[in-house]
Amino acid sequence: MSKDSAAPVPRNVASAVVIKDKDVFFLADHDGGIPAGNQDGFGLYYHDCRYLDGYTIRIADTPPNSLLATSDRGSIATFESTNEKLQLGPRTLPEQTIGVTLRRVIDSAARAVHDVFTIENYSVEPHDIPVSFSFESKFDDIFEIRGLHPKRVGRARTPSWHDDVLVLAYDGADGVRRCLEVHPEPVPENRSSSCLEFTISLGAREHGRIALSLRIVETSAPHRAPHRDVTDPAPVAEQLDRRSLQWLDDSAAVSTASPHLDALLQRSLLDLHVLRSSLEGLEFFSAGLPWYGALFGRDSLIAALQTLAYEPHIAEQTVRLLARYQGSKEDEWRDEQPGKILHELRHGELANLNEIPQTPYYGSVDSTPLFLIVLGEHATWTGDLQLFQDLRGAVESALHWIDTYGDEGRNGYLSYASKSSKGLGNQGWKDSGDSVMNADGSLAEPPIALVEVQGYVYRAKRLIAELYARSGDAAIAARLRHEADDLAARFNRAFWVADKNFYAIALQRGNRPAAVVSSNPGQALWTGIVDQTRAAAVAGHLTAADMFSGWGIRTLSTKERRANPIGYHLGTVWPHDNALIAAGLRRYGFDREAIRVLDGLVQAARHFEHYRLPELFAGFSQHQFPAPVRYPVACHPQAWAAGSVPFLVTVLLGLAPNAFEHRLDVIRPVLPTGVDHLEFRRLRIGDGSVSLRFRRLGDDAVAVDVLESRNVDVHVEPHSNLVAH
């Protein structure tokens, strides 16, 4: 491909075996390698650079036959392969004579991946087994891989050997030299420019070992010649496992009568652990792999919101981190404005060169109200005003942005119109270019005011009003409540489409409704902005056959002209969208509908490896296919997908904290279908904690037993049953 030709667009990562630790992550094929020349995003990544895009494993020049590939431990992967029928000189080696076990461990502290291959001879005769490995890298930036920036800007060096270490190197145009070092043990018998060749002599029933440490070097200083250093990955793996167990021990825990729901909940929490990253000493959830392994305002905030009942500290750190990067000036290249919360922050070569605006980029209309929502919800769980007091200036700037710069349409609604030449045309969570449309199929015209975003503003102002009131600022609290009520009244007039009996997805230029049936009004339900008299109509639309696939609620009705079950935002199912919608259904009393949404997601998760819900999946119905159809380039793991079911469990149980009063209200608790009892342990409310058991008494009745309570009063709605122990 020439430097100026169009970059290929990734095709499929649905089958990738993914592991991550902090800022290093690896997507492999099922034999543990990386298909040479792949356009699919397979590879080894660090700081938005793919350090390895080809890694082939051969037995006598033949690919192994993959038998098993698993990354259930998050940062550790295991692969099992065997040989095809091979000709070894005059001898024929029958298939399935040799076993190859690869154990791969991510070692973020060393910026390395440690691969240990165990080759075992299952036959009763000795064999000399040729094994080879080859490596290649173009050191592509993630934006090049995604087809968003075709121009190559740096210079790749010819692979070279130093002290039996293979070095792949790239001199970036940003002055950073990026290298991948391959450290082998033992030293290969033969080697070429980027290939290592071994002969493993195995007696009957014997096994041999080859270890490779793949080390990432990123430096602006002159690169020093490496010395071979192969790390024993066993202590690293033990530490990774300890950290995973510690994360689970530190988080609130849910156990149920359903092995499927339990497996899904544990996978979700482990995926969130894997997606933890840090910047400037503060932790956040990276959005998802491979495309969004970075700080994202919207995604990181929603994942933090979803996990407040389980681990509230990341929410606090995420809010503090985003406040540090809050917009301070008007910059059209980055869609930055004073008070605005970022959309995305990148650290790769293209970002360093300012070839892309993600340095950070602020093209998100909803990150700012979500920032306020998470700050407000954090206070209800922790009973602590310190975060609000520390960030009061950032709060006031965010509110000012919403009311001034954010009103692009000058109609009193938060809206967007991108000004950046490389910015996003759509700036809500459905940020693909064709995601907001009219009933005739034409695209909505900016400025665009999304229906759910007005709900975010409503909820943000109500929550922040409470914090001002608790801080003694009654006048500001009253003003924010008045603004929220006024917004709700105007919203319910302007966004309602009478002939659809539903809310428009957005208002566009000239205050014209974009009148299609979409999932967006379901998120408006979650915020509480929807008029009570219209909630039943919204719930009915969302759970009708054109919207509900059986696995979940689609992003767009199948009756709309642009409907596409495999279109990114045109009819697919997104777990996080469903979780927020189900929370909205619960808010307005549609409990059975909310349970139906959770049941669909649990059923869907059973068909994905390790119960891992991906970013999204196709919108085909259960009647069309017996399993959910994968979306080819969906992130997995993905933060707000992982947070969806843990969040939904708290929603169905009706957990409503009031940590300022050392109180937990349990409002209309319901249980998922097929779950007769559930325990929620180590639930933190302020400086106290509580453990609860929920028991089904009948079709609708649920008893709540307080198993343990420390400095928390538990109150259950009168029609439920409370038993204290």
Image (spheres, rainbow, N blue to C red):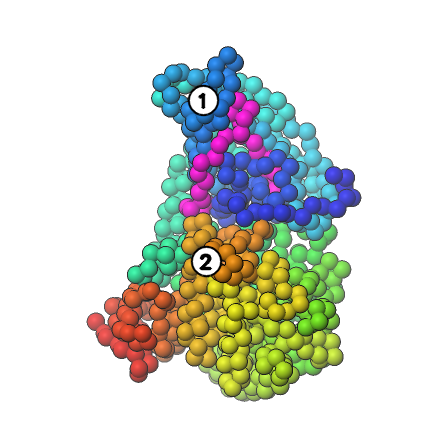
Magenta stretch bounds: 50-75
Q: Is residue 314 above or below residue 52?
A: below
Determine if the magenta segment contains residue 249.
no
What amino acid type is highlighted by mark number 1? Pro
List the residue tagged with mark 2.
604
In whole angstroms, how far apart are the C-alphas of marks 2 and 1? 40 Å
The label nearer to you, 2 versus 1, is 1
Picture residue at 42% right of the left edge, 64% below the top: 599
Q: Nearer the viewer, residue 434 or 312?
A: 434
Q: Which mark is residue 722?
A: none
Q: Position of residue 21 (x, y in %)?
A: 48, 46
Q: Residues within 10 Å of mark 2 (few under 14, many from 20)?
A: many
Picture residue at 68% right of the left edge, 29% below the top: 158
Q: Check the picture and name the quadrant holding the N terminus.
A: top right
Picture residue at 62% right of the left edge, 59% below the top: 567
Q: Nearer the viewer, residue 529 or 89?
A: 89
Tell me, yes or no, if residue 280 can be seen here: no
List the residue tagged with mark 1.
94
What amino acid type is highlighted by mark number 2? Ala
Q: Check the picture and name the quadrant holding the C terminus.
A: bottom left
Q: For residue 224, what is the image quadrant?
A: top right
Q: For residue 139, what is the image quadrant?
A: top right
